[in-house]
Image (tube, rainbow, N blue to C red):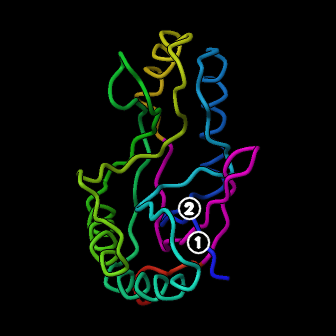
Amino acid sequence: MDMDIRCFIAIELPEEIKKDIDAHVERLKATGADVKWVKVENLHLTLKFLGSAPEKMIPDISRKLLEIAKQHNSFYIRMSGAGVFPNMKFPRIVWLGINDSDEIKRLQRDIDESMKEFGFEPEDRDFSPHLTIGRVRSSRNKDNLMKELTTLKDVDFGNIKVEKITLMKSELKTTGAEYFRLSEIPIGTG
């Protein structure tokens, strides 16, 4: 029986940066805001969420990604600052900023385009590189959260060298989503 797999294409983060982010998230948690925080081991930059894909399609998707990734060179992104979507009044998503992101935008655009042949719709809005760290569930203690977030405006989490993209599988468990690597794709020709 062919299974459908929930999957997405992402850039993984170095462990030390995750630890650094986690320390800041702990301060945000202390505000008592009603936010579902992303588990530190699950932190990643999503380039494209595919959703449901037939298992037998995975090797083809990986091959296509390899083709795309070869046309790019590895690059650096800088992680700094924090904010919320859509706005401070009605926050839904808490994020950290990604800067120096022209290269990542180009990569994402190429991936987005290339996935059309597998029936995945291109994004209807411009890709705005960010790292989701939490999803706001209600307005409880929202003001405390906003105040604490402004202290992260100038925090610099450092440079990250992006040398590969990962096709990830997402399994929804009762404890939340768990992610597994389906394939790791090097960027550039080595």
Residue 3 at x, y percent in the picture: 63, 75
Q: Tell me, for residue 12, which label it has, or none.
A: 2
Residue 95 at x, y percent in the picture: 45, 37
Q: Residue furthest front?
A: 1
Q: Tell me, for residue 4, which label it has, or none.
A: 1
**Mark 1 surroundings within 10 Å by alpha-carbon count, few (fewer than 14), some (14 through 19), many (20 or more):** some
Disc 1 secondary structure class: strand
Q: Tell me, for residue 44, which label it has, or none.
A: none
Earlier residue among tags 1 and 2: 1
Residue 87 sits above or below residue 162 on the image: above
Give the magenta part as a residue range.
157-182
Disc 2 secondary structure class: strand
Q: Is residue 143 magenta?
A: no
In space, the residues marked 1 and 2 are separated at their CA atoms by 23 Å
Residue 39 sits above or below residue 1 on the image: above
Residue 96 at x, y percent in the picture: 45, 39
